[in-house]
Image: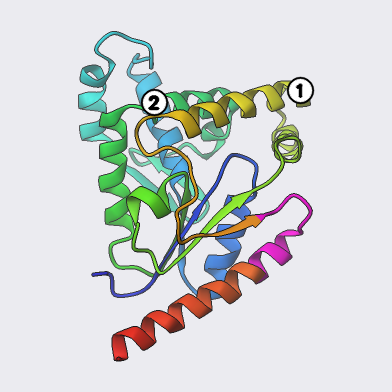
């Protein structure tokens, strides 16, 4: 790889615990943390503000100016869209659904690929999403695929949304997750799947501490192996 420091990739479906685990792992390793799902949700917000919907005719052409001008950044835990804090908006269920639909478009994925690769170019980052280990950084030094039973994921997501004051039932969350899974795993461009060299972790019955401990051990082993290979 050309990066100066190692890169970590964590992929998996909604509700598997990627964000919490990735943030904790980055802290343990002294790396930066980047949530690419939030970047796609920021795109959905920008598209909606521009009056563009995923089912519009010529949607990719309509999105062209939006994608060309878009600026997405992170200020601590804040998600910045065109220099505006949109943290409160990107977590809404309807934005997540829009993001999933827009993410199937080639123009969106190409622009996000540029931004995500630029963000991780110097390494020293733990990046989480759907296709980090397969499409964005296929040569990442350590990769994980974090999954869990869909009912467990729905319950976690429901509790998260409830804490944020969202008006939604757990059954509705479950139905949304099943549809998101179908769409993410079945899309033609960069579908959600485990990279061949990724360590798969089922978090259904694991605490976040147990998940992070397993990830840290594997990450350090991969980082040390990469160092040994460079010295050889």
Relative vertical location of residue 178 with respect to residue 24 in this rendering, above or below: above
Is 220 left or right of 57, judged from the image as shown? right
Is 52 left or right of 64, judged from the image as shown? right
| Label 2 secondary element | helix
| Label 1 secondary element | helix
Q: What is the image's colouring?
A: rainbow
Is 176 left or right of 42, judged from the image as shown? right
| Other-residue count near label 1 (Cα within 10 Å), few / some / many at <14 / 14–19 / ≥20 | few
Is residue 223 in view? yes
Instruction: Name the residue tied to disc 2.
Output: 102
**On the image, which quarter does residue 140 sit in?**
bottom left
Residue at x-position 63% and y-position 57%: 201
- Closest to the observer, 199 or 203: 199
State the mark number for residue 171: 1
Task: Work out which residue is located at the far top of the displayed protein and give it.
Answer: 57
- Closest to the observer, 36 or 185: 185
| Stretch of the chain drawn in magenta | 202-213
């Amino acid at each position: 790889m050309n990066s100066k420091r190692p890169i970590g990739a964590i992929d998996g479906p909604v509700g598997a615990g990627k964000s919490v685990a990735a943030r904790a792992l980055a802290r343990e390793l002294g790396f930066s943390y980047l949530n690419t799902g939030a970047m796609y949700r920021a795109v959905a917000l920008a598209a909606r503000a521009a009056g563009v919907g995923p089912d519009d005719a010529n949607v990719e052409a309509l999105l062209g100016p939006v994608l060309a001008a878009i600026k997405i950044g992170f200020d601590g835990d804040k998600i910045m869209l065109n220099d505006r804090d949109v943290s409160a908006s990107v977590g809404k269920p309807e934005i997540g659904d829009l993001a999933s639909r827009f993410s199937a478009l080639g123009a969106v994925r190409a622009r996000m690929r540029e931004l995500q690769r630029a963000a991780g170019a110097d390494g020293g980052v733990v990046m989480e999403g759907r296709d980090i280990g397969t499409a964005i950084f296929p040569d990442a030094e350590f990769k994980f695929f974090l999954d869990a039973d869909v009912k467990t994921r729905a319950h976690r997501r429901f509790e998260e949304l409830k804490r944020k004051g969202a008006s939604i039932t757990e059954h509705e969350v479950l139905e949304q997750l099943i549809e998101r899974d179908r769409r993410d795993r079945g899309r033609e461009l960069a579908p959600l799947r485990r990279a061949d060299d990724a360590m798969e972790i089922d978090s259904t019955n694991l605490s976040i501490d147990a998940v992070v401990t397993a990830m840290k051990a594997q990450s350090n082993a991969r980082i040390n192996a990469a160092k040994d290979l460079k010295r050889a």
